[in-house]
Structure formats: C-alpha cells, structure tokens
Image (tube, grey):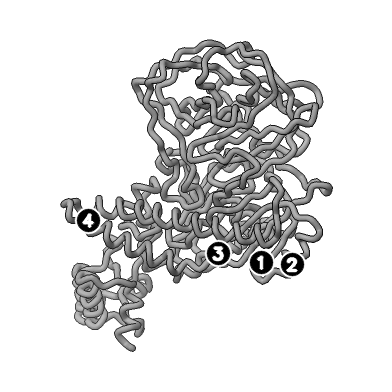
Amino acid sequence: MNKRKYLSFISALALCLTSLPFTNIYTAAEDKTAVSSASDNKLDAEKFYVVVGTYENNYTQLKYVYPNSNAGYSADKIVWENAPADLSYGDVLVSDGNEKKTLVYSAPDNPVYAMASYYKLDDTAVLNKVGNCSDLMDSKELTVTSAMYDGSGHWSIHLNDADGKEYYYGYSSYGSTLGVALFGCKTGDKYQFAFNDGKLVVPMAKKNDTETVTTVTTSSAPQTTTTAPTENTQNKSYWIFYNDIDTKDIDETVAEKVHDYTYSLYEQGLGSTEVEKKVADYSQEIRLGLLKEAYKEASAKIVKELGIEGTEVFCSNYTATIVCKLSDEQYKIAQKSENIKQITVFSDLTLAPQTEFTDKNSFIELFTTDTSGKPVLGDNVKVDAVLNSGNDKATNYLIIYGLSDVKEINKVVDKLNKDSMFMWASPIDTFSGGTYSLINTNTKLNAQLIVFADDVLPGFTGYNVENYSEKIGFDAKPYISFLGDTNGDCKLDSLDASIILSAYAKVQTSNDYALSAADIKKMDVDGNGSVDAVDASNILSYYTHVSTGGSGTLRDFLKNKKA
C-alpha cells in the first residue's frame, strides 16, 4: 500500500473499531478473553487480580479477572496507585470483594482516544498476594494468527494452540507499559499463556528462535515493540471505505441538547468557568454517542449488502471504514457498489525504528523532515516544541501554529503524513488546538502533535485559553493569536481598543515614535495598511457584538459589516 493510502489506513486505525459477533466484544475499560482448553485448577478464587505492568506515573496496573456468561473470563483494566513496590509481573492477588473501583476515561478531550479507560482502585482497597501465575496456573503455548488495533489503545489478538483450537485475547495499551505485551505482534509469533481452570488468563512470555523471554517486574517492564502482522496471501483482508454519513442531524441534535444543558447549569448558579468545562465534556460525550450509533447502522448496511457472514469483521465506530475478508464474488460486488468509495488490501503497520532526540531543535527536525533530511513544511509555517510537559510531565509536543484558517490544519497534517517519516492519527473533528497522536513508532518518544489556527479559541468546543492550557498541561498563549489582541490576553475588549487609540495618538504627535511591522499587523484591523481610530472603533463594535450574544471571529464580523 502506498503512503497516501496508508494515511486512510492510519486514520481508520486510530479511531474506535468494534468487532461483530465473532468474539466477545469488549466494553469500556474491559478486556475479554475466550474460553480456553481444559487444565488443572490450582487457584480456588473465582475472581482475582493479576499484575500486568505499570500505568502512567509508574502506578501498578492490574487485570481484574472474573467469569463471564460464556464460560470464559472477562477482565477489567485496573490501576492501583497504592500498590506495594515488590510486586512482579504475573503475581496473583485476591480480596474480600468489597473494594471500590471508579471508572476513569484516560483522554476524554482527545477524540482519537475518547473511549480509552480504566478502573481506579480505591485507596482503602486491600489485596492479598497468593502467588504467581507461573506457580498457580497451567501454561500453554499459543501462536498468533492475526492482530488488529481496534482503536482507543485496544488490541484484539487471535491465536491457535498446537491442535488448531482458536483463542482470543484483548488488551488495552493506552498509557500502559506491560510486562509481556502483544502490541505489534505478527502472525506466527508464539507466546506462553497462563490458563486457570481451562480459561486463558494472561501471556507469561514470548517465545523466540532460541528460548522463552523471561518475565519481568512491574518496575522495569518493557513495552513490546515488534512488527505488526504481515499479509497472509491465503487469508486476505480488505479495508472498505464507504460513503460517509451525513452529520447534519447529529450536529443539530447536539446543539439543542447543549443549549438546554447550558441553561440548566446556569440555573444551578454555576460560574462561567465551571459551566464551560461541563458543557465541553457533555457536548463531546453526546456527539460521540450519536456518531457511534450512526456508523453502526451505516456499516451494518454495507455488511448486509456484501453478504458478509464470516467471523472476522471490524466496523469503525467513528469513521466510514470496515475491515473484513472478502470472497471473489463479494469483492466484485464491493467494486460495483455505489455506497463504497474505495477498497484496499489490508496491510499491517510496520513500526519505525526507535529514535532518540536530545533537544527541542532535534525533536522538531525529526518530525518535520523527509528521509533525506529536507524540511517538508514551507517557511511560512511556524513550528515549535514543548518537551517533557503535559499533565504527566513526560509528553513531548510538536506544535504548529499561526495558520490563517482552521481549514489549513488538515492540509498541514496531510503534508506531514505524506512526506515526513512519521504519521499522525487525525481526530474525528478538526479544530484549533486538536491533538494528533503518533502512530508508526514505539511509545518511547511519547510525542503528540498540536496545530493552532489564528483568531479562534482552541479546543473541541472553544475553551478559553486558561482552561485549555490547564487541560493540555502547558501554557498555550504563545501559540494563539487574535487580530486586534494588542495585549496578548487572547481576548478582544475595550482595553485593546484603548491601546490602539493610544498608539495612533503617539504616531500622530511624535516624530520619534513608530509602530513595528508586528504591531501594525496586529492593530490594523481593517487591513488598510495603517493604524487609526477606525481600527479601535471596529474592536469596540465587535466587543459589543459578542457581549450581547453574537458569535464568530473578528474577521467574520468585519466581513459581514461590509456586506
């Protein structure tokens, strides 16, 4: 697949995919395992926890295992902040069953990872170690037959044992460093799995050509970064890109619900800052839910049209994309379908080699040059970086800013994806200040891309800059510019008009005073090449407009004023 087609592949991968009936479908913060073959039960507990690695801030990550209705195990992703320091991968812990857990969404403001979640174990919880999977459970070698990234950090792995019996293992990698991870595993890879009472629990080690890889403690657990599965010509799958849904009704529904919700919050006496935060979360939650239902219905029609009745079908929750196997006849139907735009042979992602960087400039160069070292962005594109930042103090941000319009954002990201050595997964919606996650590299760089356009507030629903900066984990003011914002507070008000009038007066009365090119660019609101009282008047008119319920940018306001 060429790189342009790969871009469609990456964008689809990065959004939440859901599997149809061939496996147990995982829910938020849940990894579900299929029934495995019979084995001797050495663990009496019906429900238990297994140490599987660490989460952000080096918190211990557990897998809470419990029976499901299909005679197998289901499992929840658990973060235990107060865990003892001496725990190792595969340690088994039990409790009295009264511990409390709180569902946490890891990245609610990032549409790409909006569904990534885990359960936080309450500080009062008491868990008792009873041994390790290697001692308490049986072991079986399984071979990977397929691996699929389902979106929001979740992976679905299919495996066979020596007798050809099929198994399924799902896990969430978002924010996690797992002791034995199947992230990026390829077809044919062999893993030793722990089995309890005939049910698959966790992988204990990866096998290679010489010997088994040993397990590790949670404090030093490495993230597996092997190459993803290569195409099996006897088991070919396809990406199907169908005609996108019309979101007009969804947008109208969201607007109505947000309006009513906002009014109810103000009736409760909440302040504007708190209202803004709640409305932003509510708006995204409502829209994601409606999109999920719409794409579920749309993909089901395509599946029915093609007559797909096999087991391996993946339908994206948030993009017009399906991944499935097709017979020759089904492929012909798909080619002729008016509802399908493109069909591409599924080729799994190959991870880029691990790369280090030493400072901000080398970080920027790494992500904005092609394989020959030539810059891929024009000189008019402003680029910066903020390293070891974010709320976790460990995220490295590549920042592109100063774009003239939100419509320019996709063009810049497409340019990076096409010509640079890396690819970025696009959010569902394009907006200034949106976060793009790195796809084709290992997790050591922990890099994200943020793109800002001028004259608009950042965020999915347009946060004020202070709230946005708090959420993103660094001061975003230097990257946000508004025409007429003379004092750099990211607001247009009477103070800006006053500063323009003062500057105009000085220019008129002093031969020694002159405005810089940057000052003129910011103060020349009407774009006539000079700064005068008309510019100040336009600022005041716009300020009155938005203060009385008006919306839109200053540029839009001036354009409508002329019309």
Residue where numbered disc 1 is placed:
340
Q: Is mark 1 on a helix, strand or loop?
A: strand
| Residue nearer the viewer, 451 or 254 | 254
Identify the image quadrant of residue 279: bottom left
- For marks 4 and 2, give the CA distance: 50 Å
Q: Position of residue 452 (x, y in %)?
A: 44, 61
**Is 561 placed above or below 28 here?**
below
Label whose residue precedes the other's in the sequence (4 or 3): 4
**Is 314 placed above or below 515 here?**
above
Q: Is residue 217 left or right of residue 549?
A: right
Structural crowding at the residue carrying mark 4, measured as other residues with C-alpha within 10 Å and reported as few (<14), some (14–19) or many (≥20): few
Q: What element carries label 4?
A: helix
- For marks 1 and 2, give the CA distance: 7 Å
Q: What element carries label 3?
A: helix
Label annotation for residue 264: 4
Residue where numbered disc 3 is placed:
412
Label whose residue precedes the other's in the sequence (4 or 2): 4
Label whose residue precedes the other's in the sequence (1 or 2): 2
Disc 2 marks a residue whose amino acid type is Gln
Do the CB atoms of the residues marked 1 and 3 lie less than 8 Å apart? no
Q: In this view, does 558 lie to the left or right of 315?
A: left
